[in-house]
Image: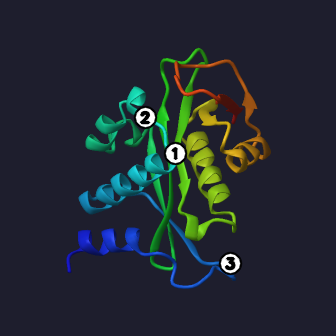
Amino acid sequence: MDTLDQCCLLLEKESPRPMDHRPVVTLLSPTLPHEMEAVRKIFQEYADSLDVDLSFQAFADELATLPGDYAPPRGHLLLAEVEGSIAGCCALRPLDTADYPNACEMKRLYVRKAFRGFGLGRQLAEAVLDLARQAGYACVLLDTLDGMESARALYAELGFVEIPPYYHNPIAGSHYLKADIF
């Protein structure tokens, strides 16, 4: 079995047992082709979980051209691995079109259902905020939806505040958030 097959199996595998302990989390910065395929698969799983059409964000092009805007040094992709399984993801990209100087955008924060409830979303978000600081950004922007109560609570705990829209999102119930990180 090649590494791509192994990577895809990890994505498809559910946790073998309930997470009744604090598992070991490894954050990976994917760069190899089989790792980008894992990113594509979990990004697609994220999009499917939203039950909204992301074509207004050119999502298909984003998947086809990974790492695209998420490439270092101005961007970053993260995968979270828990006990041998891909458990979550988060990404960072420059946002030169925003009305905020030296801004970047956090995208695609997602934790698979089998791995929710032990702080993995927080670990991913905090890691991306650290990467944004290291890259020299002044603020991080993101958008989220009404139905994402847990994510919105996490963002508030991390210092994000509501702002006016920084781009057009046609989805009803969209929220735009910003955190100053300098």
Instruction: State the mark number for residue 54.
Output: 2
**Splitting the image into 4 quarters, where does residue 141 fall?**
top right
Q: Amino acid at mark 3?
A: Arg
Instruction: State the mark number for residue 168.
Output: none
Q: Are marks 3 and 1 in contact (CB under 8 Å)?
A: no
In terms of secondary structure, where does tag 3 sit?
loop
Q: Which residue is located at x 52 percent, y 22 percent? A: 170
**Which x, y percent locates residue 115?**
59, 69
Q: Which residue is located at x 26 percent, y 62 percent? A: 34
**Image vertical order of residue 168 relative to residue 125, above or below:** above
| Closer to the camera in the image, 170 or 2 | 170
Name which of mark 3 and mark 1 comes first in the sequence. Answer: 3
In terms of secondary structure, where does tag 2 sit?
loop
Residue, far bottom: 17
Residue highlighted by disc 1? 50
- 25 lies left or right of 93: right
Residue highlighted by disc 3? 22
